[in-house]
Image (cartoon, helix red, strand yellow):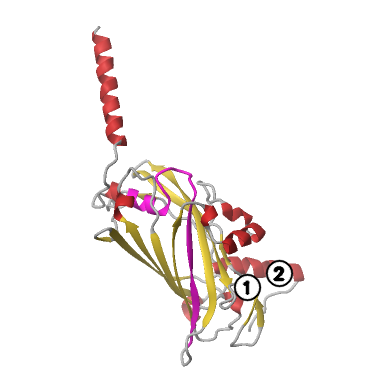
Amino acid sequence: MMKRVLLTATMLAWAATAQAQDKPRLLDVSKPEDALEVAKRAQCGTADGVPAVYHWAGNVYSRVTGEPDRLLFKGEGMNIRTCVTVNDPKRGKGWRLVSREIMLYLDPKTGAVLRSWDNPWTGEKVSVMHIANDPVNQRPQFAYGADGAPYQFRGRREGRWIFAPFEAPLFYHNVLAGEYQDYVGGKYHAMEIFDFAYDAEEILNTKNPTAYPIVSWVRISDWMPWMKMRGRQGQMVFNAMGNKLKSFDELPKVLKDEIALNYPAYTMPPPGDDARPNETTWTVFKKMIDAERAKSGEKPATGH
């Protein structure tokens, strides 16, 4: 009889705990565990392995000293990703994001996908290489860092909205620029800015399995290598806005058509255990040029 009573009490306690855990609540971003959960909901969603799609559209300008800025291209981009749970023996449970992304360069007048481009500075017609980076993965995120520092939510609430700006200053080895960049220059130097706007009720209430933020993206960078600018002074300014979509099917037709034609893998994110190094426009371009040279027997020019 006593065993039956104890078993019943245990089952009731377990059921009460499970019910409490399942009961919707508002996440508190001042708590590291909740702040981490908010970030996962913004990037992907609560469930592991479920694809999430971000879309953005905007303009790409030139910035050259002594001349007006030029509208070079329209841009249409997407990133398809998923988040998966990871467990660390010291840091506990966290999550990791895996993704791949595309941005198409479009004719600024017609909106057509560009295959070639007439460079107005050099007079040369060049082949357009669209952004197609696979993968673009992130390191695992945990409520506490390796040094014990708590995960902090970077954002502020104003009424209905939570605003979360994020700047990524980039300055690192350029795979196209040789092995002496610390001495003669040539490092990749750019700034990427992501500004998110969350509906507070949507992203903080655990009854919602995910959230659909608005995002703006700005990138200030060197010329794209496929433009063949040959060291000319100047920069590119990318400016776009978008949001997380309910599904891949909500993407604009121009993106879905191009993905079906040339990038079929981009209908799904990479596997959750993807261990490949990340790709950038520069690494993809280097592989393309190296492959073309190998096929033709051409060797890179060498100096003295």
For disc 2, the marked residue is 292
Residue drawn 48% across and 79% down? Answer: 183
Q: Nearer the viewer, residue 186 or 223?
A: 223
For disc 1, the marked residue is 114
- Residue 24, horizontal then vertical, whole percent: 29, 40
Place residue 298 in its image quadrant. Answer: bottom right
Q: Amino acid at mark 2?
A: Glu
Question: Which secondary structure lies at badge 2?
Answer: helix
Contact flag, marks 2 and 1 (Cβ < 8 Å)? no
Residue drawn 51% across and 61% down? Answer: 78
Q: Amino acid at mark 1?
A: Leu
**Quadrant including the C terminus:** bottom right
User: Left of 51 or right of it: where is 230?
Assistant: right
The answer to whether residue 145 is visible is no
- Residue 55, horizontal then vertical, whole percent: 48, 61
Looking at the image, which residue sits at the far top? 1
Q: Reply above or below: 85 against 220.
A: above
User: Left of 216 or right of it: where is 266?
Assistant: right
Q: Nearer the viewer, residue 275 or 196?
A: 196
User: Left of 110 or right of it: where is 246?
Assistant: left
Q: Which residues are magenta?
A: 37-64
Question: Which secondary structure lies at badge 1?
Answer: loop
